[in-house]
Amino acid sequence: MRKILIADDEFRIRKLVKDFLKREDFSVLEASDGQEAIEIFHKEDNIDVVILDVMMPVVDGWSACREIRRSSNVPIIMLTARAQEHDELFGFEIGADEYVTKPFSPLILIARIKSLLKRLEDKSNTVNLNGLLVDKNARVVHLGNEPLDLSPIEYDLLLYLIENKNKACSRDSILNKVWGYDYYGNERTVDTHINRLRIKLKSKSGIIKTVRGFGYRLEIG
């Protein structure tokens, strides 16, 4: 589930956006000022998009954007009633990715969010499974900020399960797709590598479920 942080000092705006986002199966975090937004961002893992109102108490949206940009390339959408061209340009200069002016259509905002996420995925070719990051281009896997030392077979096995997430994969199909049709080993090879992979996945080991008498399923809610 994608995680969105929205910071706006107007409760009705936050509720409006949150209601629409939840209908699209996004998880939503709320902040009522820029300082709270910064604190939530640094506390929470794997926030996918940040929406910042410009005019907020304590710390404004511009300052919050600058602070977040110091440590992250997370997509940032500025949400504001200030529609002047120089304000929009300033937002882009300090690191904003999109600029949405009030009043706005929640459906358009959601479309912008989805577009940002798709562009980011297309560019990085990275899969984010609730903190388990798989970079297909580099063939590396991170758990949070920690790189996992996977063998080539373990990586291919994990990738195959990811590509078939929430589906039951038979041991035979795993052997054929990961080891190849000309492999002469038996199905116990799959079990051995699944056990090793689970150990290396540490806190995420539970996402690989055993389908009794059949194979395995990578389960993502």
Image (tube, rainbow, N blue to C red):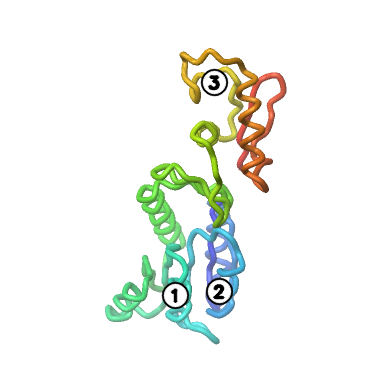
Give the Cα separation between the discs numbered 3 and 1: 47 Å
Q: Is residue 105 left or right of residue 172?
A: left
Residue at point 65% right, 20% down?
188
Residue indicated by mark 1: 65
Quadrant of the rendered structure where residue 192 is?
A: top right
Task: Tell me the amino acid under the disc marked 1.
Answer: Cys
Q: Is residue 118 left or right of residue 150?
A: left
Mark seen at residue 175: 3
Q: Quadrant of the C terminus?
A: top right
Task: Tell me the amino acid under the disc marked 2.
Answer: Ala
The crowd level at tag 1 (other Cα within 10 Å; few <14, some 14-19, many 20+) is: many
Quadrant of the rendered structure where residue 216 is?
A: top right
Q: Position of residue 173 (x, y in %)?
A: 54, 20
Of all residues, the one furthest to the right in this rendering is: 212
Closer to the camera, 121 or 98? 121
Quadrant of the rendered structure where residue 196 is?
A: top right
Q: Earlier in the sequence, mark 1 or mark 2?
A: 2
Q: Position of residue 109 (x, y in %)?
A: 43, 61
Per the image, label 2 sits on a secondary structure element best described as helix
Mark seen at residue 37: 2
- With respect to residue 77, does 111 lie above or below? above
Q: Earlier in the sequence, mark 2 or mark 3?
A: 2
Give the Cα separation between the discs numbered 2 and 3: 47 Å
Residue at point 57% right, 55% down?
144
Give the Cα separation between the discs numbered 1 and 2: 10 Å
Q: Position of residue 20 (x, y in %)?
A: 53, 58
Closer to the camera, 111 or 12? 111
Residue at point 64% right, 36% down?
208
Task: Tell me the amino acid under the disc marked 3.
Answer: Leu
Per the image, label 3 sits on a secondary structure element best described as helix
Per the image, label 1 sits on a secondary structure element best described as helix
| Residues at circles 1 and 2 in contact by the CB criterion of under 8 Å | no
